[in-house]
Amino acid sequence: MMVRLPPMGVKLSEDIEFREGNPNPFRARVRWFDPETRRRLSRSEMLPDEDAAEQWLQRMRRAANRGITPDRAAAKLAEYGESEWALAMRGLEAKSMDPYGAGWRLRIVPTLGHLEVRDIFAGTVDRAAYGWIADGCGMSTVKNTLAALVRVMEQAVRDGIIDINPARITGWNGEFKRAEDELDDPRSLALRDWQALEELAQALVERSADQYAGWGSAVKFTACTAARIGETSGVRTKDIDTRTWEWDVCRQTTPGPGGLMDKATKGKRRRTVPIIPQIRPLVIQRLEAVGYRPMARLFTGPRGGRITTAVLRDATHWDEVVVALGYEHLRRHDLRHTGLTWMADAGVKVHVLRLIAGHGSLATTQRYLHPDRRAIGEAGMALAAHLAEGREAAGPKVVPKERPQRHLRVVR
């Protein structure tokens, strides 16, 4: 929705007030008359010193000279993007509007929407993009999401709210290039076996500052259920059925306005996942620890906080641990890749694997059906056995009698 701009050059009245005892004692304030309603409006901010207060007033003055009211000059990204969407997307082809809009609504607003436009920097966008990649977003999805953000932030540059567009980042597509380079050996994205998973979990616990065992439990649970870290963080006691040993996957923890929030799983696909015997003891241990309270979280940090892929990385020194174990490129999302790879190797049919993974299409699931060398050898043996059975079923082969050899006499 396009919001009509006020006339250029709204007149501001400005003042700076010192308020003793406040951590940020200098209050900078601007006041103006709304040109449509004639109501007197104001905006203020508490700042640490007089220079910072003066810079804030200059920024508000510059915004007003460009036709931007002070309240919009200090708007949150979600508010600014909504008001300027039509202007920022002008000239865009109709076929691009839907993916750009989806990227804005599903990723940018939940991740960055609560920040003021002027408080978004290239590093902020970097972290957001790598978070989307870790959450399993494809290359085109991240590209369309960043393209929408670039256009909105470019409008903020034209409006004089910021000087440089921080959304024009580079390097994020290197993550996907690395994945393409590994297509010749896609199993490098998965841990080789249960022992490797146990070694990783134990090393992460030992490397953490408090040696909190919950980190290892969360890692093993995530890998063996082929889940996302956010889904492991979102599991509650009532989601686990210990009679059938199944997990009702119905929520995930993700960044949102004001901090972390729980919401439906990716694509809003509710699914059921089996809990294998290897991790049932740790699930029972977690259930007993929370007293079987229905809404209690099964997996949390040492102080009861929610787990995210970034929290797990920082608390366990993930990057250092995986390099030391020889898994230089192993990401937290590869725990999910590990679980799906193991299930595919175990012979789980592709349509069942799709339901367990919560994928929208079989094409996505088929990426995990990459056989190891043993499976390739077994496929050859199976084909040989099949052909041998076919030959036996056809009965004894009739061999024609050999004709006597004739010696030809050369006549000259």
Image: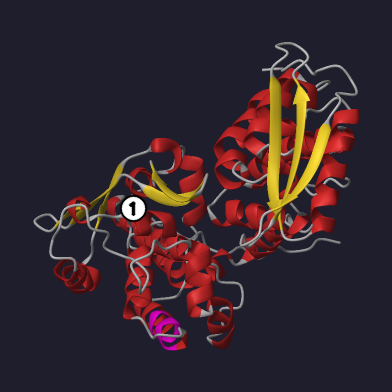
* Picture residue at 85% right of the left edge, 50% below the top: 55
Task: Tell me if residue 323 comes above or below residue 114 in the rendering.
Answer: below
What colour-coding does the image apply? Answer: secondary structure
* Picture residue at 37% right of the left edge, 64% below the top: 222
Task: Let me know if residue 84 is in the magenta part.
Answer: no
Residue 194 rendering spot, x and y as whole percentages: 35, 77
Q: Residues within 10 Å of mark 1 (few under 14, many from 20)?
A: few
Task: Let me know if residue 202 is in the magenta part.
Answer: yes
* Picture residue at 84% right of the left edge, 45% below the top: 165
Q: Could you tell whether 31 is left or right of 105 in the image? A: right
Pick whichever, 144 or 48, lies toward us. 48
Residue range in magenta is: 201-206
Pick whichever, 265 or 211, lies toward us. 211
Task: Tell me if residue 272 comes above or below residue 301 in the rendering.
Answer: above
Query: Where's the C terminus, which quadrant?
Result: bottom right
Pick whichever, 196 or 323, lies toward us. 323
Query: Where's the N terminus, which quadrant?
Result: top right
Residue 214 visible in the current orientation:
yes
Residue 100 visible in the current orientation:
no
Quadrant of the rendered image containing residue 72: top right
Three-letter code, disc 1: Gly
Quadrant of the rendered image containing residue 84: top right
Disc 1 target residue: 390
Q: Could you tell whether 122 is left or right of 255 in the image? A: right
